[in-house]
Amino acid sequence: MSAPLVDIAGLRFAYPGAAGPALDGLDLRVAEGEAVALVGPNGSGKSTLARLLAGLAVPDGAERATVCGHDLLDAAGRLAARRDVGVLFQDPENQLVAEDVEADVAFGLENLAWPPERIRARVEEMLAAFGLGGLRERAPHLLSGGQKQRTALAGVLAIPRRVLVLDEPTAMLDAGGRDEVLAAVRQVRAEGLATVFVTQEMREVGLADRVVALERGVAVFSGAPRELFADLGLVTRLQLGVPPAAEVVLALRRAQAPGRDREATAGEAAERLPLTLDELLAALAEAAL
Amino acid sequence: MTAHLPQAAGMRLSCRGLTVAYEEAGRPIPALSDVGFDVAPGASVALLGSTGAGKSTLLQTLKGLLEPEGGDVVLDGLAATDEGFVALRREVGLVFQRPELQLFAGSAREDVAFGPRRLGWAADEVAAAVDAALELVGLPAADFGERHPYALSGGEQRRLALAGVLAMRPRLLLLDEPFVSLDPAARRALVVVLRRLVDGGTTLLLATHDVDAAWGLCGERLVLDEGRLVAAGPWAFGAGGEEAFAGHGLEPPFLVELWRRLGRPVAEAPRSAAAAAEALR
Amino acid sequence: MRATITQYVPGRSPLHRLDPRIKVVAVTGLAVALFVRSSYGALAVFGATALVAVLISGVPARWFWRGLKPLLWLVGLTFVVQVLFARGEAFFSLGPIHLTWEGIERATFLSVRLVILVVTGALLTLTTPPVALTDALAWLTRPLRRLRVPTEELALMVTIALRFIPTLLMELDTIMRAQRARGADFAHGGIMTRARALVPVLVPLFVVSFRRADDLALAMEARCYRPGLTRTRLHPLVAGARDWLALVLVVAVIVVAMMV
């Protein structure tokens, strides 16, 4: 069993001048090839954690904070982490730096001073992998949201990475863009890259192997999505975006037992919130409705 | 306490043969072709279509920000050439996509007051409209009035921007993709506000690609596809549930599909999860 | 729209394909030589060179005209000033105005020289994409790094700024329309009124830009950008035989002009 790629315990971070800490003793482990979803309400520390994982911020302290073997508490370690951990941010517009798609994908490799022939080869690989060949000379402002995010992703992954962190990458996209980006992420996952996916949509949590829920800077849940979806009270507390199928079941619970959905229903773990129409129909059939 | 903006009757809206084009690199691109429809006062109508179908163009033309090449916009029976049309146009409110990008003042109250002041209202009328609008969007003036717009959360900023338009007391309210890039909690809060508006009698035209949100808030719909109007009027679902959506990049609302799969009459499909739960018990 | 902002007209002419550094050096050399040597012969040589270059570039004449238009006032002013204040025998007098042949001759000379200068400069900007230009300038000013001038970083800043100009224009357009929808009026009133009317547009633009700068800096760091480190390029500037030949030709032209 290889060492975890991300091994964090007791991570603390506060923004200067803020009322309280953003992260207050957070634990997180991610193994090779694992896909972890990071959920939680606004202000729970998800984005802060995403940045810290990539060595883009300085932690206030931790018992242990190792990412890909680099120590986040040490400046050199953080710099090294930036190389091994890629981050895709939320706003598609504010990640593209260069005059066209091809140049933007090359940006990271230029920063690492790769020889031009190696850059060219890698850029071709990335353009092909993310279906951007036809957009090679397109200027960023002429791209759709989904195309911008795919370009940004290609640029992030042009540098060979060991972990990919995604901070709500579809939050600012319409349905079409969301599908494009999620397909690209699924593709990357299929190639075995460990991913940490910050999201507030239950729909996207289903893609992960494991979910970690944050509340006020600490992890309050770590387990399979199925277990999370069975805990109706937790789903509500975390303010997750619930697909229509799950909304119907939540409404049924509230109608049948007003006030009960606030309690953790660990005992009824067999029932879980459906994500799709088919799952809902199956659940309704089971309950003989 | 729920404050009301003075209840004025919603505006009647019509279009006849509306055609709008814009230029890109010297070539005219038709954004809307021969669009015509009627909206009764107080109706809440969803404007559906995928990105690029012409929804934003239509809304901006209705507000008068874009000039049509051909056709008319008719408000309360008056056309552009009629006396009083300009005054009616001022009673049309348009909330752009991601409206929080327009916030500029030092306090919530100041920003919301911008529109009413531009209408030339007296100071006390402005103050009353501002407070009522803030109340309506769930940002009561007592708590939020003096807060700096940039200190608010994304969802609060969006509602603040909406208040800025509501304070102008529009009788026809046009919303361009109000739910885009909102976190789930903010989305729910906004739906509550929109429901209040729908119940309040303002004519509402809601452009969105979120068919489920539209189903929950609107009694009728207009469907645009590449600048053409392909459907107008109350929701109508055939036996297959597809109605006018098939081939225009839209899926029927979830609850409609659910009712169809359950073998229940599609015409009775519920508008909300709560209503569905009631019907299923 | 893009061509108007950056003045670049895409093409495959020999001029387009020249190394941008050579072009910058050539144009600078020609411009300086144009002003150093004040003979008709030199003017003719430079004029002919510019004309030939315009033809080789394949860029339609209207682009050069567009580049010239804003400076027509300067050309006109030069002409008028020279005519009015020249010395020599007047062939026509009206009150304080004395027209002399020498005056007209001088005015024509200076005006033509100015036009040749503008056209030569336009040859550079019309055939060179902005990023290539920035790369060329960064390379040429590299010695300044010894004086602690951050030439590479400045070049990157210019590239990024250029990339965001169309985005900012689109955002400006949207914000203006949104504020107009709230009753803002940008078209009427005196200077002070219009300036004040722009506040609801400029403040949001500034805020968006500052936020953008923060986000962008983070995204760049996440892709291992660090100021001060040497960066390689996807398309490095490589000067070939053709480029050196062009430079030699330009030097030859200058030498000839100096002697004529």
Image (spheres, rainbow, N blue to C red):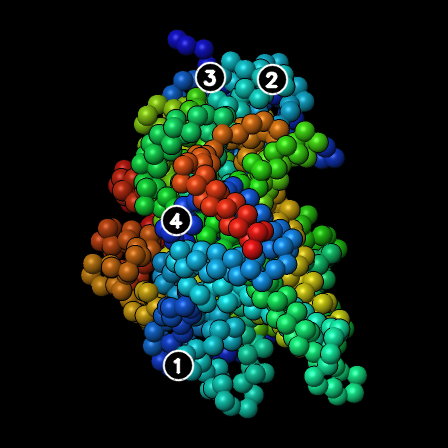
Q: CA distance from mark 4 to mark 3?
A: 53 Å
Q: Is residue C66 above or below residue B106?
A: below
- The spot of residue C87 in percent (x, y) is 75, 73
Location of mark 1 (residue): B70
Residue drawn 29% across and 39% down? A279
Residue drawn 57% across and 41% down? C137
Location of mark 2 (residue): A76
Q: Nearer the viewer, residue B193 or A190?
A: A190
Q: Nearer the viewer, residue B65 or A49?
A: B65
Q: CA distance from mark 1 to mark 4?
A: 47 Å
* Three-letter amino acid code of the residue under disc 4: Pro
Q: Secondary structure at mark 2?
A: helix
Q: Which mark is residue A5?
A: 3
Q: Nearer the viewer, residue A52 or C109?
A: C109
Residue drawn 40% across and 55% down? C56
Residue furthest to the left in view is B239
Q: CA distance from mark 4 to mark 2?
A: 48 Å
Same chain, marks 3 and 1? no
Same chain, marks 4 and 2? no
Closer to viewer: mark 2 or mark 1: 2
Q: Secondary structure at mark 1?
A: strand
